Image: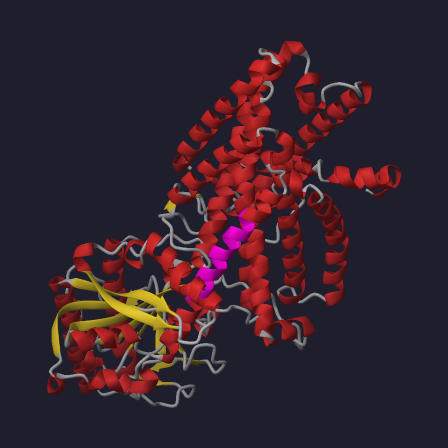
């Protein structure tokens, strides 16, 4: 499993070795994809979705209403200190209208899709332009046109096959022609999002070292040399002016270096594409795909097989279809400028909403950078018929897929929210209704953070039996890059202790590694054991402080959750004789200081209450002894159920539109979404559920 974020970046000697290694590796990012994109990061992660997650944390603009106040207690949930009076009109306006929430998401998806489009174009143009130097080196133009395409395609195939291992005066003179030429020089500042999104692969210092001491001086010298050559040779063949300007004696070494550099630069944008797709998938904006973490030491280095091969096919198609760097450059230029413009707009929002700076400062930032980018963007649009149409087409196609998936995800969540069943219904299930409790642990997966999901009621209706230990599991993504293992699990009871039903919310950041099923099973049981010990210690062996009203009703207990992390255990007074019931499990009782109780009355409810407990030395020993016996019985039931086996109960969803829905909605959901759902990885594959332990419950969502 990857190390915790920030673990490698301390001031120890080893960390500097790591930073220098990352600085060397980041040369492919900064040199192959030089940018002026601001590195406004989210806990060391970059990209369009990193900015979006920052905004979602500071303003209620997320379209999926599963936000909990307990999430704000996460250590990585960094929020700027609010001003004395938070009366930002921008934030109030942004939160008030749901239309603005949708518009913000569309802007984010546009930037994301343009990055993915750049992931198609950059490898093609980089490798093709490097291989084009063969015309100057060894072969005639006639033979060159038949050799470059096959060689380029071969290098691209090899490149993708190895992925799994890991100014006004200018314009004043030239006027219209100068403005038009801006669209042709965009390759000098390409990759605006690649370096930003690749913050997760590297870090600030690695990129700064590589850029300041090597990349920037080398680029300045290279561009000055080419400019000097072109000023003396106006009539030379400008198609391959770079190779013509290189002295013949070193042309071969330069050609080899150019090809190798193009491979490194292509690697950078491809890895950036993987990163941003992983982010969008975690936030419910992309169909489920397989994400492979290629490093067990450095966070963020991911590989997505399906996307890798799709990118390879598209890169080869672009190379064969365009056959020249002019059209590829025009296409890449438009994609780059769109991403830079989106990044600038989102950063201006971050300045106001997240950093609590005056709106005038954000406006000046937007005006200064946005005006320059709009100038280049308008120039690149003039190349629409000369290749710039391609990123627009790719972005439109990807935006339809991503928006459709996100829209259906929201509708399914709202359906679950409105059709959840009450706790009283669950408690009423029993032998009198012909319902049996069978041995084992039943894990009912749901997207809900409160209530009993409708798929469980469907399960019990068709099969009148459920497991002795029942756990409602919600695997939830929070708008932070990483959640530490100590803060990952929120555990609580569903009903009284005798019912043996629990709720477990497992929180992951959008860059976290999801655990495999074996470690998840054992860790979940351990967290339940820790919670049972703590809950009995809390409610029977301690007296509550004045912050709690003393109520222990079934309804209120179902909303009380406890953060169960890497806890320290200590023997409490009166409990020395009570040990764990299974060898290898933690003994004693968790200390009060290592746990946090949070009452979540409803999702998005502002009334959060924290409950603290103080040790009462005057409690009668008989009460403690009785509590110890009951706790022992509950732990024995838990471990006996684990030995009997664990079943994973998942919903197999189908989406249908209501009668009277528009034709567009019917086409989008009945055909578009269901097609994507059938052809992407199922939830059982994403959760790594063994087929022998899987129980699927068919659910039809009428939206």
**Residue found at the very far right of the displayed protein:** 173
Residue 463 in picture, x, y percent from top left: 15, 74
Residue at image point 61% right, 15% down: 141
- Look at the picture and state if 533 lies above or below 552: above
Q: Residue at x 22, y 88 (%)?
A: 620
In the foreground, 188 or 523: 188
Count of numbered marks: 0
Locate residue 212: give its quadrant: top right
Q: How is the image coloured?
A: secondary structure
Question: Does the image show residue 481?
Answer: no
Asked whether residue 499 appears in the rendered view, the answer is yes
Q: Residue at x 57, y 54 (%)?
A: 110
Tell me residue 668's x, y (percent). Answer: 45, 63
Residue 77's x, y, as percent? 50, 63
Q: Residue furthest top?
A: 249
Q: Residue at x 48, y 38 (%)?
A: 314
Q: Main secondary structure of the magenta part?
A: helix
Q: Nearer the viewer, residue 61 or 31?
A: 61
Q: Quadrant of residue 658?
A: bottom left
Q: Quadrant of the C terminus?
A: bottom left
51, above or below 468, in the image: above
Residue 701 figure quarter:
bottom left
Residue 632 among those drawn in magenta:
no
Magenta run includes residue 402: yes
Q: Which residues are magenta?
A: 394-408
Picture coordinates of residue 670 (x, y %)? 39, 64
- Taking the image as shown, residue 667 lies to the left or right of residue 489, namely right
């Amino acid at each position: 499993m990857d190390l915790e974020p920030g673990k490698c970046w301390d001031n120890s000697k080893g960390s500097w070795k790591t930073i220098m290694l990352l600085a060397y590796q980041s040369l492919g990012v900064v040199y192959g994809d030089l940018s002026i994109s601001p590195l406004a990061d989210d806990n060391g992660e970059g990209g369009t979705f990193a900015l979006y997650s920052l905004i979602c944390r500071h303003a209620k603009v997320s379209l999926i209403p599963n936000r909990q106040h307990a999430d704000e207690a996460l250590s990585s949930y960094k929020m700027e200190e609010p001003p004395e009076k938070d009366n930002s009109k921008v934030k109030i306006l942004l939160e008030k209208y749901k239309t603005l929430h949708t518009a913000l998401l569309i802007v984010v998806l546009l930037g994301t899709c343009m990055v993915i489009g750049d992931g198609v174009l950059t490898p093609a143009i980089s490798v093709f332009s490097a291989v084009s130097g063969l015309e100057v080196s060894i072969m005639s133009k006639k033979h060159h046109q038949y050799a470059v395409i096959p060689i380029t395609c071969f290098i691209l195939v090899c490149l993708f096959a190895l992925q799994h291992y890991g100014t006004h005066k200018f314009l004043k003179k030239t006027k219209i022609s100068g403005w038009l030429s801006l669209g042709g020089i965009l390759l000098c500042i390409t990759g605006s999002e690649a370096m930003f999104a690749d913050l997760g692969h590297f870090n600030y210092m690695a990129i700064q070292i590589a850029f300041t001491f090597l990349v920037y001086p080398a680029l300045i010298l290279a561009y000055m040399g080419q400019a000097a050559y072109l000023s003396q040779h106006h009539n030379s063949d400008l198609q391959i002016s770079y190779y013509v300007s290189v002295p013949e004696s070193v042309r071969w070494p330069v050609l080899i270096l150019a090809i190798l550099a193009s491979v490194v630069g292509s690697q950078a944008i491809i890895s950036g594409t993987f990163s941003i797709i992983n982010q969008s998938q975690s936030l419910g904006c992309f169909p489920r795909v397989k994400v492979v973490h290629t490093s067990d030491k450095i966070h963020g280095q991911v590989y997505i097989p399906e996307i890798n091969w799709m990118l390879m096919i598209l890169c080869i198609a672009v190379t064969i279809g365009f056959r020249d760097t002019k059209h590829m450059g025009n296409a890449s230029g438009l994609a780059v400028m769109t991403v830079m413009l989106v990044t600038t707009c989102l950063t201006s929002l971050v300045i106001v909403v997240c950093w609590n700076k005056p709106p005038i400062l954000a406006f000046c930032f937007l005006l200064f950078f946005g005006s320059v980018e709009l100038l280049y963007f308008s120039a690149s649009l003039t190349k629409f018929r000369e290749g710039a149409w391609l990123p627009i087409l790719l972005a439109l196609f990807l935006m339809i897929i991503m928006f459709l998936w996100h829209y259906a995800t929201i509708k399914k969540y709202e359906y679950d929210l409105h059709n959840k069943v009450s706790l009283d219904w669950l408690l009423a299930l029993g032998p009198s209704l012909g319902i049996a409790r069978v041995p084992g642990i039943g894990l009912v997966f749901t997207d809900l953070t409160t209530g009993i999901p409708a798929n469980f009621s469907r399960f019990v209706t068709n099969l009148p039996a459920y497991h002795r230990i029942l756990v409602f599991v919600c695997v939830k993504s929070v708008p932070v890059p990483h959640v530490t293992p100590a803060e990952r699990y929120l555990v609580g009871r569903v009903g009284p202790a005798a019912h043996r039903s629990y709720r477990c919310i497992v929180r992951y950041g959008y860059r976290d590694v999801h655990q495999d099923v074996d470690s998840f099973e054992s860790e979940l049981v351990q967290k339940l054991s820790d919670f049972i010990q703590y809950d009995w210690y809390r409610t029977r062996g301690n007296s509550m402080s004045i912050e709690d009203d003393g109520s222990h009703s079934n309804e209120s207990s179902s909303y009380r959750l406890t953060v169960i992390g890497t806890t320290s255990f200590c023997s409490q007074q009166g409990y020395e004789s009570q040990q764990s019931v299974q060898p290898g499990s933690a003994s004693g009782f968790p200390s009060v200081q290592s746990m946090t109780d949070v009452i979540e009355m409803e999702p998005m409810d502002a009334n959060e209450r924290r409950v603290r407990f103080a040790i009462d030395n005057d409690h009668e020993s008989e009460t403690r002894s009785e509590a110890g016996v009951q706790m022992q019985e509950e732990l024995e039931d838990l471990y006996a159920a684990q030995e009997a086996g664990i079943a994973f109960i998942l919903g197999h969803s189908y989406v249908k539109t209501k009668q009277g829905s528009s034709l567009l909605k019917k086409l989008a959901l009945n055909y578009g979404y269901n097609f994507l759902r059938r052809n992407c990885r199922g939830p059982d594959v994403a959760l790594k559920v063994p087929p022998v332990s899987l129980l699927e419950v068919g659910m039809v969502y009428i939206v």
